[in-house]
Image (tube, coloured by chain):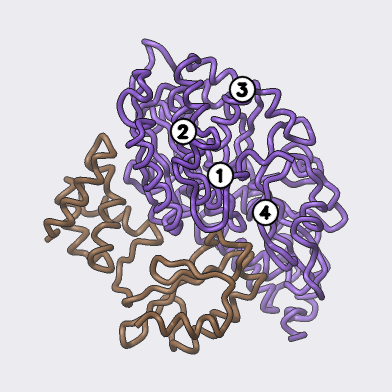
Amino acid sequence: MERPLTEHIRQGTALTLKEYLKVGGYNGVQKALKSMAPTDITGLVKSSNLLGRGGAGFPTGLKWSFVPLGDGAPKQKYLICNADEMEPGTFKDRYLMEGNPHQLIAGMIITSFAIQADKAYIFLRWAYKKSELVLRNAIEEAYEAGYLGKNIMGTGFNLDLYIHTSAGRYICGEETALINSLEGKRAIPRAKPPFPAVSGLFGKPTVVNNVETLSWISHIVEKGVDWFKALSITGEGGTKLFGVSGRVKSPGLWELPLGIPMRQVIDEYAGGMSDGYRLRAVIPGGASTDFVPAEQLDVKMDYASLPPIGSRLGTATMIILDDQTCPVAFLHNIERFFALESCGWCTPCREGLPWVEKILLSIEQGTGREEDLEILRHHTKYLGPGNTFCAHAPGAMEPLQSGLKYFHDDFMRHINEKQCPWKKRN
Amino acid sequence: MLSEQEKQEILEESKAYPHLQAVCVDALKIVQHHRGWVSDDSIQDIAGFLKMSVHEVDSVATFYSRIYRQPVGRHVILICDGMSCMIMGYENLYEYISQKLGIRFGGTTTDGRFTLLPISCLGDCHMAPSMMINEELFSLLTEEKIDELLKRYQ
């Protein structure tokens, strides 16, 4: 089984430039800059069907193709790498940045060339101190070797790459909020249209891509579309970083083909449940994805297979809810996070999420009423897609709507027994 | 007054952007790095230096969780309260640290040594429960490990 993104990553120290070159690194950059036109690269990535690895799964090449090129287009364009990994349960981008930073930089050079950007930023999460250190070092190496800066590899293409470390807010992961934050403002999402590809950072055409997405680019340029497509089990193309955390024997992160059954990742790679714990449900890809119940573990882990059972692939880093954890308390933890992280810009999100959080806390503490479940259900619609300014509140409602469905009996026990059955037992 | 070094660092960082005002978040971080937190006076100084209004700078400062608008202890403990850390028992560890230090989330010990704060998921979920002390990450926490860590930060 091929593992292009992680095969050279080892425990402890990042791959240096010298080591990256030894395994063929920057070959993709050479090929792209010296023998391909920008639109050819975008076309190639489009036909590879590389779907955004940040969670939304938007086709990468299509995103790039919205950037206006040519004489009539604004000269200044920007590429931003979204490295603000803050989706609860997600720890994949950290691994890629700390293990193989040049793979990301190479992808950013090619992408910048494809959209004709001469400035690129890595928007990095504040807490990722080691990632910052590794990336700063790798960027310095790349400048010294002539992969960044003026006239890269004698091609006449220029690119400056900067790191911006954020000051901490989940909403910075939303691409238009990220752009505002990079402009030094409050990270509040912008109205769309115009989309960033037309008017983004400082009003210029801008592409925002996730770390894992960008890490693919030099591989696809070097080895081609057929190779990429053959990597997955189902038709979507490529491998994906899959994570498992919670009460399993060996929590961790693995690069596996898209389309691998969820059960196989949990049983074979994560070693199954820890002794004394039973699996109740799985959050498949970060806090803003719907629960997958224990009966559905044979679902294939890819972008197309999870929606029919009511969920999403998201970041593909699974959190396992076990039978010793109270699902109401777990949902309260999730909704408290979303309530705290609401940027406060639009009213339904700012007011609705704290209401949801308070109701869940009251049910958890044994003072909830049956009518409260109706209020929660109302919120899953009222804060759903189309009613808020961005995807923050709708994302928050995904685990809540499926949680209300799958854990109805647990909710009722809290209400009827006027206490948390899990706390009672302890 | 901003120090010469703070001004230098802010100007250096501003080279990444086409407008001076875009460095606002970085400027707040730089001042906090030198002073531990960002006071009302610092907000005024940054506003003056970046040619922005005081309210504009304060609205940015109060938006971000990692900009402290009141003094913090010498060391800041950030306990991850994310979903995976909850499953792996951060709440018990929080109670343990809280009792040991005599403060709850948001509090600072009377000797000014520690401030205790929650932080959302640290992206270390396979090694939960986790926390940061200042800029260092600690994983697979136990009560014994916390005892030993707290001694390290005087």
Q: Which residue is mark 4?
A: A243
Q: Is residue A110 above or below residue A240?
A: above
Tell me if mark 1 has few (under 14), some (14-19) or many (20+) residues whose alpha carbon lies within 10 angstroms of its own: some
Compared across the picture, whether B34 is left or right of A381 comes to left
Q: Secondary structure at mark 3?
A: helix
Q: Which residue is mark 1?
A: A388
Asked where in the image residue A228 lies, by quadrant, the reply is top right
Residue B16: numbered disc: none
Residue A108: numbered disc: 2
Q: Amino acid at mark 4?
A: Gly
Q: Looking at the image, is mark 4 or mark 2 earlier in the sequence?
A: 2
Which chain shows up in purple?
A
Q: Quadrant of the C terminus of chain A?
A: bottom right
Report, in whole angstroms, how far the alpha carbon at label 2 lies from the one at label 1.
Answer: 32 Å
Residue B11 location (% of width, % of height): 19, 46
Q: Amino acid at mark 3?
A: Lys
Q: Secondary structure at mark 1?
A: loop
Tell me if mark 4 has few (under 14), some (14-19) or many (20+) residues whose alpha carbon lies within 10 angstroms of its own: many
Residue A191 location (% of width, % of height): 47, 35
Report, in whole angstroms, how far the alpha carbon at label 1 lies from the one at label 4.
Answer: 30 Å
